[in-house]
Amino acid sequence: MATQQAVSERVIVGKIAGVYGVKGWLKILSYTAPRHNIFSYAPWLVHIDGAWSEVGVVEGRPHGQGLVAQLEGCDEREYARTLVGCEIAVLREQLPAAPPGEYYWTDLIGLRVVNQEGVELGRIDHLFETGSNDVIVVKGEREHLLPYLPEQVVKEVDLAGQVMRVDWDPEF
């Protein structure tokens, strides 16, 4: 399939969700926005059998409501089936710089979350989309679900200081 990738900062951009057809094509679940942007990054790093391997994308395209791709070395359905569930990543340096005031989710994970009164709520565990706004999952003494609303809830993101300041009641 490909060569072993040295340890570097990887950003998860999707997952292999299923097989498509009989010639080794795969259904791709993309975490990029818009979702077809996953095809802008090459090569992919695919987490296969506990190790990251560099994999070329032969072809990728939208298909119905999803995406499909054919990867180098994957030209039969049985092999494709073994890749279902594998995460897809790219190296951090493959991503364009975020515009001022915008952040990649991966940059926010692990930040300490402190409210305006100085109460630490915990650390950002992950984020998810709801349709109306993204939600920040903060884990500390208890779990907090904060809407990602810049200026309303999220007052400041200090990546260098590894802290996000929020307007949020710790009891909520």
Image (spheres, helix red, strand yellow):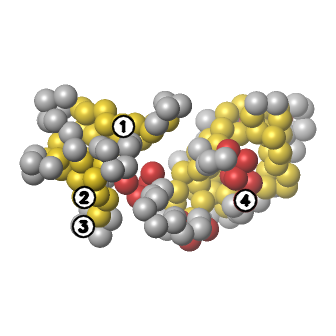
For label 4, the residue is 40
Looking at the rendering, in which quadrant would you find the C terminus?
top left
Q: Amino acid at mark 3?
A: Gly
Residue at 21% of width from left, 39% of height from top? 168
Tell whether label 2 touches label 3 (CB within 8 Å). Answer: yes
Res 3 → quadrant: bottom right
x and y, in percent, of residue 103 in the image:
45, 58
For label 2, the residue is 163
- In 3D space, how far apart are the residues under numbered discs 3 and 1 (Cα atoms)? 22 Å
- In 3D space, how far apart are the residues under numbered discs 2 and 1 (Cα atoms)? 16 Å
Q: Please, which residue is most extreme toward the front here?
A: 152
**Camera sees residue 16:** no
- In 3D space, how far apart are the residues under numbered discs 4 and 2 (Cα atoms)? 31 Å
Q: Is residue 150 left or right of residue 33?
A: left
For label 1, the residue is 147
- In 3D space, how far apart are the residues under numbered discs 3 and 2 (Cα atoms)? 6 Å
Badge 1, how many Cα within 10 Å: few under 14, some, many 20+? many
Q: Which mark is on residue 52?
A: none
Mark nearer the N terminus (1 vs 4) = 4
Secondary element at tag 4: helix
- In 3D space, how far apart are the residues under numbered discs 1 and 4 (Cα atoms)? 29 Å
